[in-house]
Image (cartoon, helix red, strand yellow):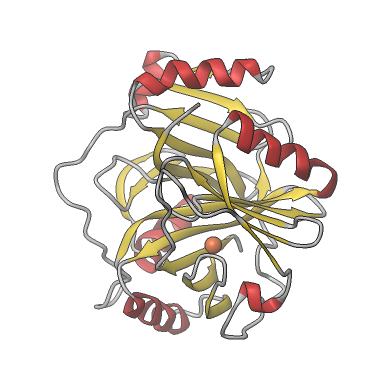
Amino acid sequence: MIRYKKLGYVALNVTNIEKSTEFYREMVGLELVEKRQDIAFLRCSSDHHNFILYSSEKPGIKRVAFELEDEAQFDIAVEKIRKAGISPYVIPEAESNALYQGKTIRFVEPNTGLTFELYSQIKQIEDPYVPKVKGVKPTKITQLGHAVVDVEDEKFDGALQFFMDTMNFKVSDFSGDKIGWSWMRAFPNPLHHTFAIVRGNQSKLNHIAFMTEDIDSIGIGRNRLLDHSIPIVFGPGRHKPSGSIFLYFLDPDGMTLEFSNGMEEFPEENPRQPRILEPNLDTLDLWGSTPDPRFSAVGEIEKGM
Ligand SMILES: [Fe+2]
């Protein structure tokens, strides 16, 4: 079974790369590491990148990348993906070098159409990441938190099975009478979820989350976003499943982002069983706020690799 270190990075398509790069630096607090003509690499850790922006005509999610536990996992991953009837694209060395990554594969998950990348190493930057934003007080981001996608109704069960059986994601919680949300951890990463799927009308991006050091970072972030007229579309509130405090807001293309503080962690051995939670507003927010209609409204899944 594939073993992971963490959610490595998310690549988004954005319609105005200059504007979005500025936004992710000044409003979110990521550090710009490298800018090529149509690509911006940003980080929130010692990794060369935890976020890549690609210039595109349509906003959306390009791919989600997970870092494997070690190099030994690479062959295991290739075999698992092949066993599921998918030919993974083993990235030529020149291409993985250009990404500052070790051995890397890419494949399209057949139900969501989402491209996944698995890699064994990434270049480490010696200077520590220091969260900086426009203004004085930053939101102290500790790491990229999770990616969530909507999956169209009839593809949902197949997707869930693929993530559990092929990718070795472990479900931490479900919600819904007919399972509607499925929060998963990239085993044995302890976080309640680094990836989640939501049953929807169509497959698309739901949101991307950044984890913060403290609750003050959420409040400080909220004031910064309000000061710059950035739409806040849900929260602040507290999610029942993970216990996280959240604040959702929109990037310049209208894609949904989250600042998230605190999360249940699972041991590798003898973890608690997943719960099936009520599909009500209390599960979404114990503090009683409700999402704005713009919440998770924008972001197609890029087809193909
Ligand atoms: Fe979230």
Position of residue 221 measured from the top left corner of the image (x, y, whole percent): 39, 76
Query: Which image quadrant is residue 228 in?
Result: bottom left
Residue at coordinates 44% horizontally, 55% vertically from top-left?
A: 145
Looking at the image, is 229 positioned above or below residue 274?
A: below
Q: Is residue 151 visible?
A: yes
Residue at coordinates 41% horizontally, 84% vertically from top-left?
A: 223
Front residue of 12/196: it is 196
Looking at the image, is 121 positioned above or below residue 250?
A: above
Quadrant assignment for ligand 1:
bottom right
Considering every residue shown, the one lying at the far left of the view is 126
Q: Is residue 1 left or right of residue 87?
A: left
Front residue of 243/68: it is 243
Query: Which image quadrant is residue 143 in?
Result: bottom left
Query: Which image quadrant is residue 114 in?
Result: top right
Residue at coordinates 76% horizontally, 45% vertically from top-left?
A: 156
Q: Is residue 15 visible?
A: no
Front residue of 93/55: it is 93
Considering every residue shown, the one lying at the far front of the view is 270
Position of residue 252 measured from the top left corner of the image (x, y, whole percent): 54, 63
Quarter of the picture containing the C terminus is top right
Position of residue 7 measured from the top left corner of the image (x, y, whole percent): 43, 44
Q: Is residue 191 left or right of residue 101?
A: right
Q: Is residue 3 left or right of residue 294?
A: left
Residue at coordinates 63% horizontally, 72% vertically from top-left?
A: 284
Position of residue 77 measured from the top left corner of the image (x, y, whole percent): 50, 22
Q: Number of marks in the image?
A: 0
Q: Is residue 211 left or right of residue 163?
A: left
Front residue of 164/19: it is 164
